[in-house]
Image: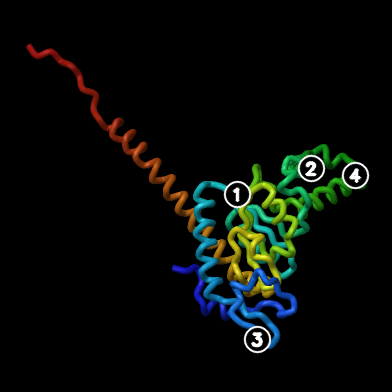
Amino acid sequence: MSQVSYKELLDAGVHFGHLTSKWDPRMAPYIFMEKNGIHIIDLNKTVACLDEATAAMKNIIKSGRKVLFVATKKQAKEIVESEAQRLKMPYVTERWLGGMLTNFTTIRKSLKKMSGIDKQMKDESFIALAKKERLMIGREKEKLERMLGGIADLTRLPAALFVIDVKKEHIAVAEAHKLGIPVFAMVDTNSNPDLAQFPIPANDDAFKSIALVTTAIGKAIEDALLERKKDKEEEEKPEETAQAIEAKTPVSSNVDSE
């Protein structure tokens, strides 16, 4: 069963593309028609692509890996950050720092620095510092948290990227390609769908459209996390049962009968 219905996509305006003059010809297979100078996305293709994307996303999450959410455009930030936080997934909603994936070692150093500043500010010795020095340290922490706060718990490279607008996030997409990290992305009629291993043809500018697709991806991740938890519990059960049986089994004593 599909994560979203055709009607939900229609109501959210997922089918509205860009002006025909701004289209990318590689999006032709996903375009239904042209109306009043605007390309209309084929929602049947959107449903099919979203089903394929959510199925693949579930497999990644069930393997125990993380998916990095990327959306720096204004209308996408809030919903993407909210969904990523709910699922405890890493996210980037401020400026993408060049090398965030390809130079991950350096990024990890910055994350350690951020953690170190946090500890320093909680220490009693911090109060003894001059006001100006405390202010400078506070500003540095604030800057690091704004840029890297969403990936603070990312200890290794993500298994995939979920991107809103491949044109806007072209640096992130290029880095993912370089490292062989699959990209799940909303692609509008002005985008190149070939930049994503799992393209989802959709209006990537309207808040309702972004929210609907992001929530569908989030639901797939949530389901996969629950399935993974259930599978782990099932694996532990036989071991627990065996231990319980062993504990209840009376120790037989060898008494010689006379």
Q: Is residue 37 above or below residue 82?
A: below
CA neighbours of label 2 inside 10 A, class few (<14), some (14 to 19), many (20+):
some
- The x, y position of residue 96, in whole percent, is 76, 55
Label 1 crowd bin: few (<14), some (14–19), many (20+), radius 10 Å: some
Residue 35 shows which numbered tag?
3
Image-based side of 45 in relation to 91, left or right: left
Mark 2 → mark 3, Cα distance in angstroms:
55 Å
The earlier-in-sequence mark between 2 and 3 is 3
Dots 1, 2 in contact, CB < 8 A: no
User: Where is residue 197 shown, x and y percent of the image?
Assistant: 60, 58
Residue tagged 4:
133
Is label 1 in contact with label 4 (beta carbons under 8 Å)? no
Q: What kind of element bears circle 2?
A: helix
Residue of label 2: 117
Identify residue type, mark 2: Ile
Q: Mark 1 points at which residue?
A: 159
First reached walking from the N terminus: tag 3 or tag 4:
3
Residue 40 figure quarter: bottom right
Q: What residue type is labelled 4?
A: Glu
Q: Which of marks 4 and 2 is in front?
A: 2
